[in-house]
Every structure is written in structure tokens, then in C-alpha cells.
Image (spheres, rainbow, N blue to C red):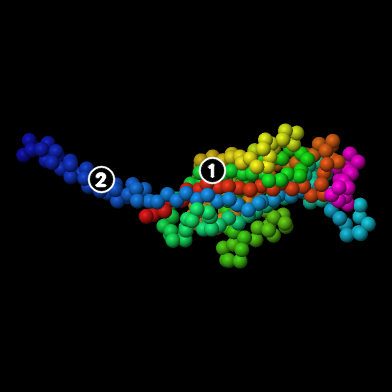
Amino acid sequence: MGGNKPQIVQRLLPLTIMILAVGFLMGDFCEDVFSIPLEIEHQTDEITLTVRFAPAADGDSDSETPTDGDMDFDGEVPEAENPNFDPETGEYRLTPSHLTIDFSESAGGTNLEKYRGNLVGVFVRSVEYTILQNTIPADLPPLDIYLTPLVQGDDSDSFDWKSAIESGEFDTFELKELGVGDKGLVKLGQTKRAYFGDPVPDFPSKERLVEKALPANIDEISNTILSNFKFEAVINASDSILVPEENYNLLPETGEVQLQLRLMVVVIAKA
């Protein structure tokens, strides 16, 4: 009997391989093979971040608060009340901004609604940004871009981002470089620093790639998008703004940087 064991093993080996192969095909591999990649291009509306340079008006009609075209700081940084100004450092802070993005309304005719419950993955292939306007006479710090499924709206799962930003609540949030921070915020990437003395080529029409976060964030971003066809893009300056003294006479009452995002996303759906 002992001499027949090698023959039995030889006969069973092909059957074992066949069973394993069928199991493999019915598992993740089968899901990958019978999945549909949907490429979505989404161009957002304009997103505007602001910074107030003039001191806040005190309600007096005779206030000497400067206005556009009549700005003279006499070589001194204003020290009156200004929520964007830090008198200790002499620096200004851009107010964060947000924008609701709805992938179900994206261009290309892709109707994600019919795949609800059958989405298995999302890959943010690239994000480009265009600076449409910049009225800040100083170097512009890199801007951090975050995604979160908590959108602005009236449903129970929404969040009032406008109030959170205006009240200063947003400043208390934990914003992680990797992983999920407060309110589901996941860092997607960062724009490049723009130097005031070194004009951007082809401004404002030239699109530039966002410097993406590390690949470890991809799964978190995927989960963020999969949890809702709509999500919020939140833009926040990575650093404050220091205005050179020689540029004080160029300061508007309120400075603005306006940009637009174009996201290329691949959504994987079950066939």
C-alpha cells in the first residue's frame, strides 16, 4: 500500500489546484475582474480665502478705517481689532474656506446613483488647481486641502462649516497629516507656495498639480468619498502671511485668493 501513495498524491494534486483556483476566482480576484472603473472629472466652483488687512470698524461713522484706494498705514502694521492679525508676530492669517462637491452631478454623464451600495473603491488620481485671483501683496503660503463627508446642508448627517469657520471653532479641530482628523477631515494634499516677487507663469490660467499627501492617506480618502457621493473640500492656509513693510501701501482692505480645483477620480463599481 505504501508504494501507491505517490500515485495517489499525483492524482489528487490537479484536483486540489482546480479547487483552489475556483475559490480564488470567486474571491477578490473575481471581484477585481468583474468590476467597472469609472473615471470622473470634476471641476469645482471658485473657492475664495480672505484676509482682512484694515482694522475692524468700531461702528463710528467717522472711523478712519481705510478703504480700497485709500490705504495708508504710514509704515506701521495696524494694531486695532482685527481677527486676522497677530500683533505679536505682525502676521496675518487667511480665513479658511469650504465648498461642497457632489460627484453625482459631475461631468461625463456618469450616474453614480445606480451604483449606490456597489462601489468598492475610489482612487483620487490627481488634483489640479488654478489660482484665479490674488490681491495679497505678500508671499502666499501653501494651502492645505482636506476632504470630509460632513457636508454643508440640512440633513442629519450634515455640518455647518460656515458657522464653524466664522466662530473660530474650526481653529480647534485636529488636522492630521495622515489619517482621519476631527469631523472626518482627511488631508488630500497641498498647493505650492506662491512668491509675490516671482510672478506665476501664465497667471491666472495655468493649472498646477497639488502636491499629494502620502499614499497612506489614499484608503482614508477612499472611505471618505464612498460614505457619501457629496463631500466637503476645506481649504486652510498652512502658515500665516507676513507683509513686507514696503508693500503696506499696496494693501487692500480685504485681500483675497481665489482658486478652483479640478479632480480626476476613478471609482470602482461592481458589475
The residue nearer to you, when weighing 118 against 14, is 118
Residue 250 belongs to the span the image colors magenta: no
Return the residue nearer the eye: 189 or 89. Answer: 189
Q: Label 2 amino acid? A: Ala
| Residue 45 shown left or right of residue 166 in the figure | left
Numbered tag placed on residue 45 in the rendering? none
Residue 223 x, y percent position in the rendering: 49, 52
| Residue with the mark numbered 1 | 126
Label 2 or label 1, whichever comes before in sequence order: 2
In the depicted view, which residue is nearer to us: 65 or 175? Answer: 65
Residue shown at 67% from the left, 44% from the top = 131
- Residue at disc 2, secondary structure: helix
Q: x and y percent of residue 31 in the render?
A: 35, 50
Count of numbered labels shown in the rendering: 2
Residue that label 2 marks = 21
Most common SS among magenta residues: loop
Magenta stretch bounds: 65-79
Residue 124 at what x, y percent from top left?
51, 46
